[in-house]
Image (cartoon, rainbow, N blue to C red):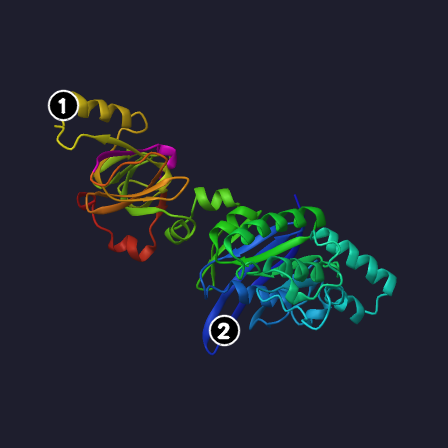
Amino acid sequence: MSTKLIDLQHITKSFDGQMVLDDLNLYIRENEFLTLLGPSGCGKTTTLRILGGFETPDTGRVIFDGEDITGLAPNKRQLNTVFQKYALFTHMTIAENIAFGLRIRKKPESYIKDKISYALKLVNLDGYENRMPDSLSGGQQQRIAIARAIVNEPKVLLLDEPLGALDLKLRQDMQYELIRLKNELGITFIYVTHDQEEALTMSDTIVVMNQGYIQQIGTPEDIYNEPENAFVADFIGDSNILNGIMLQDKLVLMQGVKFACVDTGFGVNKPVDVVIRPEDLELTAVPADAEEDSEEYQRAVRRVTKFNHGFLTGTVSHLIFKGVHYEMEVQSGGFEWLVHSTRMFPVGTKVLMSVDPYNIQIMNKPASEDEEAVGVEDI
């Protein structure tokens, strides 16, 4: 396991009396690609700026490789930052832009020339030395900004929403470029974004933040498949989140129907939040006029109960083709379910919905909601 490189200890920060970070504790390992993910105002960029030395915390310490660097100036830290606005010097050539930091450090010209050539090859822009920044595309300018950062051989590269100004195709291309660079360079990447897809695609570890607090830390798979609370479940991808009652271990009641699940340890008759991803719902169409005791209806029931002994009935109310799947809304028991499927069910189709027990995520309600939760008979 990689060793701990950065340790943020009890960091607080406020601006004009508004708390932005509240007792934040976080450590980052060597060679890790860690993403700070959250909505605007959650504190992720402030955390990055404190790491880079551009902001000083009100309280707390920043420990880097065993040394307290809380009061150290940005240019004294073994970190480099790549911003959303690339901040290239428009009056300098690409080579001069890349060499800027090296010349400040009074490195020999032969060393600088070798570093420029190395950095341009690394970002696949070999031969661009004499070009001017305004002659490059947005994606190329971003690569030059990264090249300028990496020639200084930082132990850590800080990236503050660096792909935000690019179009979708360029963003996707640059995501793969950043993964390649991280693997080739063997340095630690700390990446700030509000884009869930970017975080899931590139990260070794994701830190989900909201209102100055860390909500969850984990691998992309953990964050997506095992969200710790409703905020994380709702923020990372699409989710159906509804009230439920944990009747006992591995049995939950939602919308008046009992469903098998795999969660344990919640107690008996405990109000909970139930999370089901849209792609995990299985739909089976039934004729609108089919009676529940008809053989046709019962065949459909047998098909859906192969996953679970519980199922819900509903009607497709909305349909959109998204390319790789159909996105549908299904009205059932006063709840609007979001469903993703490669099969198309026209608007108005009566459906039975089921879900594999392993795809039902159970979460504790916040204490305030728990105290006010309704009884079993109301679910």
Q: In this view, does 155 lie to the left or right of 212?
A: right
Cα separation, mark 1 vs mark 2, equals: 65 Å
Say whether residue 66 is visible.
Answer: no
Looking at the picture, how far across and down is residue 332, in whole percent? 21, 42
Q: Looking at this rendering, what residue extends furthest in the top direction?
A: 295
The residue tagged 2 is 14
Q: Residues within 10 Å of mark 2 (few under 14, many from 20)?
A: some
Looking at the picture, how far across and down is residue 170, in whole percent? 56, 53
Image: 98 above or below 349: below
Viewer-nearest residue: 18 or 351 = 351
Looking at the picture, how far across and down is residue 173, in whole percent? 58, 49
Secondary structure under tag 2 reads: strand
Number of callouts: 2
Label number found at residue 307: none
Viewer-nearest residue: 68 or 193 = 193
Taking the magenta stretch, the answer to whether it contains residue 291 is no
Part of the protein shown in magenta: 349-361
Q: In this view, does 349 lie to the left or right of 281?
A: left
